[in-house]
Amino acid sequence: MGTFTVADVEVKPDLAARLIEIRRHLHRYPELSFQEFQTFEYIASCLKGWGIPYRQVGETGIAVDIIGEKGEGPHIGIRADIDALPIEEKTGLPYASCHPGVMHACGHDGHTAILLGTAYQLYHRRKEWAGRVRCIFQPGEEADGAAQRMIDQGVLEHPRIDGMLGLHLWPHLPHGTVGVKYGAVTASCDDFVIEIEGKGGHSARPHQSVDAIAISAQVLQALSVLVTKGNNPVDPVVVHVGKIQGGTASNVVADRVVMEGTARAVALETRRKLKSQLIQWVESIAASFGGKATVQYTEGHPPVINDERMTRALEESAAEILGPGSVRLLKEPSMGADDFGAFAEKVPSMYFRLGVGQEGRPVYDLHHPQFQFDDSIIPIGVKVLVWTVLSRLQKGAETGC
């Protein structure tokens, strides 16, 4: 195994300029989940231009296997998401989206450019290390089940991946810092649809009816109690109803209401318990008012839970690259979700935050129409990933990665 120094992973100015050009192209031509056909072609063209072999996974996914020529070693996967959001961009950037109503408002264009740079660096140093790195360009992260779909298509197999790395740009950390969290990083996100059936009638004679709207009000109140009283208060849980439809006129007792929402939890056991509680409570409340409730509960993204050994490797590597003061230990998980959790369920994984917040500038959150970041973060992300992979590969035989 070769011996590497921090200087070996520096991103040369010409490569940094090319990666920024790539990021801006992706930003200008965003595509929604599972519609990333031009994005796929563009990523493929970048890889072809560098002479890096790749394979297509599904319709718009790409996997790049880079094999070290020093012999056998650990197999590490790195994921970047490539899809955009249905948001009208309001940044005013010269390379703003030219697709109306579609925007890279979550930084996936940056993730993709960082992983392309990582692939380039590792490929051109492949004679110096052992093992395998699989760069995974994943479509559809903003949709349900995309990561699992790639897993079902064998992206973790042939040969088996031993561990995964993933990152997300994060506006709530200073530019160029790394946020590290041991254990749970993000919550699960499950969707539910509650259909309440009552008995319609005239508002002047409510006793002859079963008011589905009144039942829905009780259900809504009960869901907040479920969070505060039905679960351990130190275990984060969110239950949110974002859409309610029911009723036809002011003087008609509604016979049907549909409620849609999401349920989030950090702990796996809490997630399972929350599902059964929600269904039981809703059905019981509706029955107690003489109505009926049907709950369609769809399990979506699992929580992202970081492996301790992988997390320590990233933390140490980032500190070596950026300096110890640039690594922040995150105290709390985010109640947001990321389907990287599907990878983390299958293999030891590590998912970290890469800060893009800039002092003196407004902080726009992810999914905001004015979200943007400074392109200088791209070579920083490349260096962190490349150094983590190389140093972990060097230590792979000892750590059992």
Image (tube, rainbow, N blue to C red):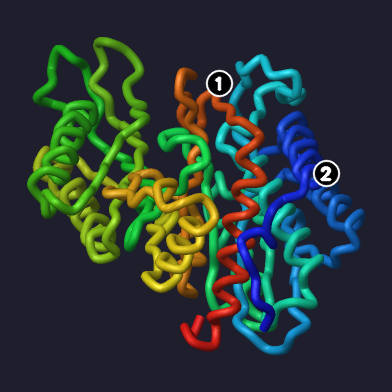
Q: Circle 1: is it few (<14), some (14-19), or many (20+) Cα within 10 Å?
A: many
Q: Looking at this view, is 248 or 204 the one in front?
A: 248
* Towards the viewer: 274 or 201: 274
Q: Is residue 287 left or right of residue 327?
A: left
Assign a secondary structure to mark 1.
loop
Q: As displayed, is residue 267 above or below residue 366?
A: below
Q: Are marks 2 and 1 in contact (CB under 8 Å)?
A: no
Identify the residue at horizontal 14%, vertical 12% (top origin): 204
Local crowd size for mark 2, using a 10 Å CA cut-off: few (<14), some (14–19), many (≥20)? few
Give residue 224's position: percent from left, percent from top. 16, 38
Location of residue 308 in the rendering, given as x and y in whole percent from the top left corner:
37, 70
Tell which of 164 and 126 is nearer to you: 126
Residue occupied by mark 2: 14
Q: Amino acid at mark 2?
A: Asp
Q: Nearer the viewer, residue 101 or 307?
A: 307
Q: Quadrant of residue 391?
A: bottom right
* Residue 310, x across and y down, in percent: 45, 70
Q: Is residue 399 visible?
A: yes
Q: Is 324 above or below relative to 359?
A: below
Query: With respect to residue 173, does 361 lie above or below?
Result: above
Q: Which label belongs to residue 370?
A: 1
Count of residue discs = 2
